Amino acid sequence: MMDYINGETVSIVLFFTGVYGLIARRNIVKSIISLGILQVAIILYFISANFEEGAVPPIGDVSSSAIVADPLPQALMITDIVIGMGVTAASLTMFIHMYHRYGSTNWLKVKRKRMK
Amino acid sequence: MIDFIWLIMLPIVMGVPVIFIKFNIAKKIIAVFQGLMVFASILNFVHIKKNGELLQNIAGWPDYIAITLRADLLAAAMVMLATVIFMALILFSMKKKFADSMFLFLFIALEGLIIGIFLANDLFSLFVLIEVATVIISILIMYKKDTSSIYDGTLYLLINVVAMSFFLFGTGMIYKTTGVLDLYGIKEVLGKMTEPDSVMLPYAFIVTAISLKAALMPLFSWLPKAHGTPSAPSVISAVLSGLYVKNGIYLFVRVQDAFSGLIDTSSIFVYMGLLTAIIGFLLAVVQDDIKLILAYSTVSQIGLIMMALNLGDERAFWGGLYHIFNHAVFKTTLFLAAGVITDHYKTRDAGRIRGVYKNMPIISTAAIFAILGIIGAPFFNGSISKYLISFGLTEFIGEIGILIVNLGTVTIFVRFSEIFFGESNLKKPKTDGYTLSVITFLGILCFIGGIFGQSIISFLFNEYFEVNIESYIQKAASFLITLALGYGLYYGFIKKVNIARFLQKHELSFNGVCTAITIFFIFILSYVRITH
């Protein structure tokens, strides 16, 4: 049982929790939060996907250890964190603009006003 | 020989100082610079045509560590198309009021990103480029900051970020199974595997994201809002419809190729393309807004291209790729012409705009050339690509499909061309020289693409196809019949019966689009699981 609770499965569950949030929540802020959950799930997946017991970080002198962790996913995820932050900031800014114009945080109400 | 990295970086680097200098000088600098970009991309294309596919490491890092850029003939041709279209658009916006330095910067940076997407070789750099392009495009959509465009821009941003999350998750899974990220490496590793089980999930994730980018059937509802948003400048609509959506199709071709060793879903995408084309046509024909008519007709044309690419016939495949180029040219012309028309008439309602031909004869002629291209009239570029596509259609579904799609396109543009006729009491507008020359140039390009279609195809793709005069005449005859049918369908049925009007109000909310993405993902996953 405990074997199943590893980074991969947790991240897949997290990912679909985020997707659920996107589908079921009509609050725009909650949609942006759900996007954050998706990003966290992705980061967790990348970091833990090729995890091996006892691997050392690929920094400094690594000659003493037999297993070295794969540095690529970590490099990619640093990029992704930066991008994710930028995207979240952009969507929150846009949300504030939208809130000023439409006076609502609800997707349906905003859409109804837009269609008029 | 030009380093690919400069094709991507130069537009962005050039854009930054432009923000700080006077706009009148800045736009001249950018126009000259863009001329150089066109020149560079042509040089690049000629070089690759001569020497074959080329792989470059960024910044001189050794192999396996560096980020690589790869250009084959198709990528180089796409880059050339991108620079030419951007050249036209920058000249077009020379004397327009909406443009300022910031706009110019975002616009030219977008060019670099689009070129980057064509040249990028690994999934993660694709992700980064697309994500940045998404943010820039959503800012450009809401550039005029009016109420409806803010909604459209936000929706565009969030939907595309959701899709790219799917893409990145798929990338992670692919990296876990294969240990590589670049598309050719994936193809190589997957070629050695025998069991497709472990790549089904990542495939479904990645294809879902790319289908959204390419605006396939249930996932296109962001497209008309983004491409047809009322207040966005027409150059933005033109670049989105003409170029950016082609990035999605191009990625689709690349990803299908990378996975082709294990997973083949082309037969389902033929039907998806057909469905997309039909629904796009149904929604286009009921719109009143001329920009929305054009945006939905893009959806329908994408369906046609998707069908052609997945038919599995070589001629249809290259015909589909040629149609990408043609569509870029005529849709850009149409959007630019629509922009000029709406600026003059102060309305976008196709029912109220009349007498455009009398007021703007030159622009109307170019727009009519583009319409003749898109409906596939003989001697125009669309006829060549549709002629080639129709070869792949040996099966029943294809025969019927292309007839319906053609009929749909004809009907859409019968409706659209109503605006050229009649009388209008408005004065003749003053159109500046840049606008006129750009639209005329693109209109003539539609004609050239038809007359010299064969030689252009062999120039672009190194493929030669015989256009048989007899069957070409046969196609021309069937075109005339379709034209008559389309006329009848529009005036006899759609215009009289308001049953289709409820379609006009069809629109998914953000939650609806997310549901559609999830359903599409589950559908692709179960399809792959059942058939493999």
Image (cartoon, coloured by chain):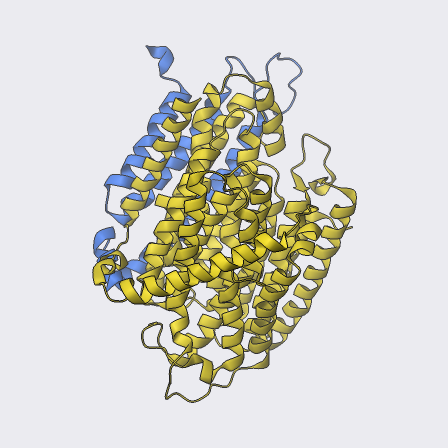
Chain colours: A blue, B yellow
The residue sitting at 60% across, 76% down in the picture is B437
Quadrant where the image shows the C terminus of chain B? top left
Residue B234: x and y in percent read: 46, 68
Q: Is residue A26 above or below residue B345?
A: above
The residue sitting at 64% across, 46% down in the picture is B74
Q: Is residue B237 above or below residue B45?
A: below
Residue B43: x and y in percent read: 75, 55
Judge from the rendering whether residue B166 lies leftward or rightward of residue A1; answer left or right: right
The residue sitting at 66% across, 60% down in the picture is B452
Judge from the rendering whether residue B169 lies leftward or rightward of residue B84; answer left or right: left
Q: Is residue A76 above or below residue B152?
A: above
Residue A18 found in image quarter? top left
Q: Is residue B474 above or below residue B213?
A: below
Residue B493: x and y in percent read: 27, 62
Judge by depth and name the residue closer to the eye, B379 or B10. B379
Judge by depth and name the residue closer to the eye, B442 or B54. B442
Can the viewer see residue B8 in this picture?
A: no
Can the viewer see residue B420 in this picture?
A: yes
- Count of labels shown? 0
Residue B90: x and y in percent read: 58, 68
Judge by depth and name the residue closer to the eye, B383 or B143. B383
